Amino acid sequence: MSEWFDSRRGLRFKCTMCGACCSGPPGYVLVSDAEVVALAARLGLGRDEFVARYTQETIKGRSLIEKQSEHGYDCVFLDRESVPGHAVCGVYEDRPAQCVSWPFWRSNVRSEEAWRRAGGVCPGLGKGKLYPPEYIRIKRARVDI
């Protein structure tokens, strides 16, 4: 195992607030019914209004919509203006499980090669705090990505 990827000791990650995990090619930010209710309440909207305004039905399930930007397709709640030079989540405290579990998705942690590939998108992989395997397993179990 390398210093960069040691699944026995854990994996390092530090969010750089670059927004890369919330942008890129068209994709999905899947939301459960409970997450829809929490996000709607956060924005002071009824469930149906939130669904109509901020989500779409996809082949994978209900997803937050995206907005096109110079970076690709941003999550509708990605804010690139409030903090100059950084991208922040406008609904951070109520963000979906898919977002909470990043970067510890099953697809990213299955091998060193997968972790390095994800690191090509996210500059925070392999840096910062060492997250132990137990923590990663809990995060990874939240979504099937």
Image (cartoon, rainbow, N blue to C red):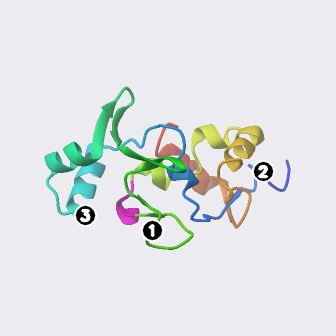
**Rendered image: mark on residue 42:** 3
Tag 2 secondary structure:
loop
Q: Could you give the CA–CA distance between mark 1 and mark 3, rounded to whole angstroms? A: 20 Å
Residue type, mark 1 in image? Glu
Residue 40 position in % (x across, y down): 22, 56
Give the CA distance from mark 2 to mark 3. Answer: 37 Å
**Which of these two is toward me, 57 or 25?**
25
Which residue of the protein is positioned furthest toward the top in this rendering?
Answer: 59
Q: Which residues are magenta?
A: 90-95
Reading the image, the residue beneath label 1 is: 81
Residue displayed at 78% across by 51% down? 6
Residue extending furthest toward the right = 2
Q: Is residue 85 left or right of residue 109?
A: left
- The location of residue 99, given as percent across then percent down, is 47, 52
The reply to whether callout 2 and callout 1 are in contact (CB within 8 Å) is: no
Residue 115 rendering spot, x and y as whole percentages: 71, 45
| Apparent side of residue 119 relative to residue 96 in the rendered image (left or right) | right
